Amino acid sequence: MEGGVLVDISDTCLASEKPFLDLESFVGDLNVDDDTPSDDISLEGLEEELQDCKIDDVVANILSKGTALREYTKGVENNLRQVELDSIQDYIKESDNLVSLHDQIRDCDMILSQMETLLSGFQTEIGSISSDIKVLQEKSMDMGLRLKNRKVAESKLAKFVEDVIVPPRMIDIIVDGEVNEEYMRTLEILSKKLKFADADLMVKTSKALKDVQPELEKLRQSNISKVFDFMVQKLYALRKPKTNIQILQQSILLKHKYILSFLKEHGKEVYLEVRAAYIDTMNKVLSAQFRAYIQALEKLQLDIATYNDLIGVETRSTGLFSRGREPLKNRSAVFALGERINILKEIDEPPLIPHIAEASSKKYPYEALFRSLHKLLMDTASSEYLFCDDFFGEEAMFYDIFAGPFSVIDEHFGTILPNSFDAIGLLLMIRIIHQHQLVMSRRRIPCLDSYLDKVNIALWPRFKMVFDLHLNSLRNANTRTLWEDDVHPHYVIRRYAEFTASLIHLNVEYGDGQLELNLERLRMAVDDLLVKLAQMFAKQKLQMVFLINNYDMTISVLKEAGPDGGKIQQHFEELLKNNTTIFVEELLLEHFSDLIKFVKTKGSEDPSTGTERPITIAEIEPIVKDFASRWKAAIELMHNDVITSFSNFLCGMDILRAALTQLLLYYTRLSDCIKRINGGSTLNKDLVSISSIMYEIRKYSRTF
């Protein structure tokens, strides 16, 4: 067989492991038949083909054996012929099987032909079915569209029927039911039906609505009448004494606020009647409450100042012991701020409860009552403003409601303000109004802006008028009636110091420039008055003592108002310094006049210059001996004088120390002068040592 031949050739090629022979040696041995025409044989390219055949295993094996190619070719042809014969024999042997296979193939072909016919029929039927399905699909889409349209129409019709129909249950609730949560829900449904009936012209012209319209109108009128009676009843409840208005508004009225919305939309005239009734009711109720509260507060008022309680008015002329309702202990509150400043720290405190305060027999300055009244006004106004916005949806009606309460407060304020001569109280009220404006701003409620501005505008001119009364009382003061033969601080100056300190304290956080200018005017007036009072003393020393005592007292009071000082305090500190220097000179002249005169006139002269007459020992010896004999006693007298002259011990000790220091300087200059005199050493035995004087000064410093 062909396969066997190939195997043999392969085996032959694989079995040969000899090296390749030179092909050129075999070319010469090739025998070409003589009968082969030379024209048909071409050896061109043979060399390249032989080189290519070198890599073929079979060819290489053949060449390695040295066998002639023609013989090998004949052998191969014989083998092929034998294989062909064998193959024919094999086909002959398998002829029956081939016939059987041919029959089977023919049968399969027939079966496949039948299948083709059957499938062609199926294809035709499927094409017909596809056309039917397409038709059905179109019909389905058409039916779906019609169904969708019918559903839309059904929903609209159902909505229309639902909006138009009046259920018997709704009629029962509207006509016979109580005004409660269920009634409010039913009222919302009725409102929707009424709006629906008026919403569309097509709806208005429908026959169904024409049948229902009379019933809806009856329900509307019945409901309006019913809710009007209900609201009027609740408004009358507001007028009952001791009714907590805020609780009634929050717990009852706000729960039924939809009634107002219904009336506003479907019963405008009745809504306006309810609105007017509420405004009238609350106006009267709040006016009465504020009037009663003001009357109760007036019983708690503590009178502080009258027309005669001015800085420059003499005490005796004010009837100090004949004051009626005002106790003597409250006189200091006219000019001193004291604990009254605490009212600004109580801005957010609840209003006073009059009957509790009255039971404790406690009295309050008017600014405390003023704060309490306006705290109540702010809380009430804030609550009412928010309620009007929530319940009626109208903020503007607040001003109609509070026209009455504002009038009541204005009337009260109109009687209090013209009779108020308490400048500190007026400024406190101005600061209270400012704080209340901040409170309302933080609440973001603007309803009291104009009112608080109006009160503030009314307070400032009154404060200015009372301030000018104090200023004029100083300018026009009668020094003869005010003067007292006493060098201690004058009561008028103390009034001024306390009054100024109070106003400065109240202006610390506000920096009111106009107030500062007024205080400067007041300071100039008191300067003039103080100088005039000092000039009433015969001796200059007493004048200085009087001025120093008053300046020191004024500075001490001003420091309590503001430790950082100010222009006014600095002014008085400068005056104190200047007058202290003058007093020290006067005090030293009183006890050491010869020493001081000598030092000032001749102590600075230099004997070596010869321009002046030389100082002799006879001139200076009495001064030295006089000082040595009584300097300690003189210092003791100065100490006693200072102690008795100055009210402020610390100020007196500062002055004494300054006097002793100045005395030491004078005596040092005297000692230097003696050293420059010829023969001055003879006075050394009478000179007091500087250390002795220093020791004495330190002794009094320890006392300080």
Image (tube, rainbow, N blue to C red):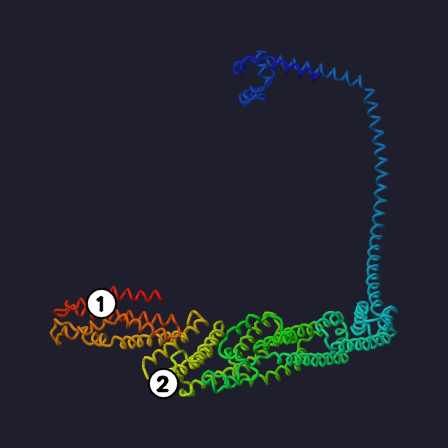
Which amino acid type corresponds to the residue marked 2 in the rendered image? Answer: Met
In-image side of 143 versus 623 (left or right): right
Q: In the rendered view of the protein, which quadrant contains the N terminus? A: top right
The residue at which mark 1 appears reads as 688
* Residue 445 % position (x, y): 62, 72
Which residue shows up at 25% across the image and 65% down it?
692
Can you tell which quarter of the image residue 578 is in? Answer: bottom left
Vertical arrangement, residue 265 with respect to residue 466, above or below: above
Vertical arrangement, residue 342 with respect to residue 141, above or below: below
User: Given this view, does label 2 or label 1 mark the residue nearer the observer?
Assistant: 1
Q: In the rendered view of the protein, which quadrant contains the C terminus? A: bottom left
The residue at which mark 2 appears reads as 536
In-image side of 608 versus 480 (left or right): left
In-image side of 353 versus 677 (left or right): right
Can you tell which quarter of the image residue 240 is in? Answer: bottom right
Which amino acid type corresponds to the residue marked 1 in the rendered image? Answer: Val
Nearest the viewer among 696 and 657 is 696
* Residue 399 % position (x, y): 65, 79
Nearest the viewer among 442 and 106 is 442
In-image side of 55 versus 185 (left or right): left
Nearest the viewer among 415 and 696 is 696
* Residue 395 % position (x, y): 67, 75
**Dot 2 crowding, Cα within 10 Å, few <14, some 14–19, many 20+:** some
Report the label total.
2
- Spatial CA span between label 2 and label 1: 40 Å
Nearest the viewer among 437 and 509 is 509
User: N-terminal of the two: label 2 or label 1?
Assistant: 2
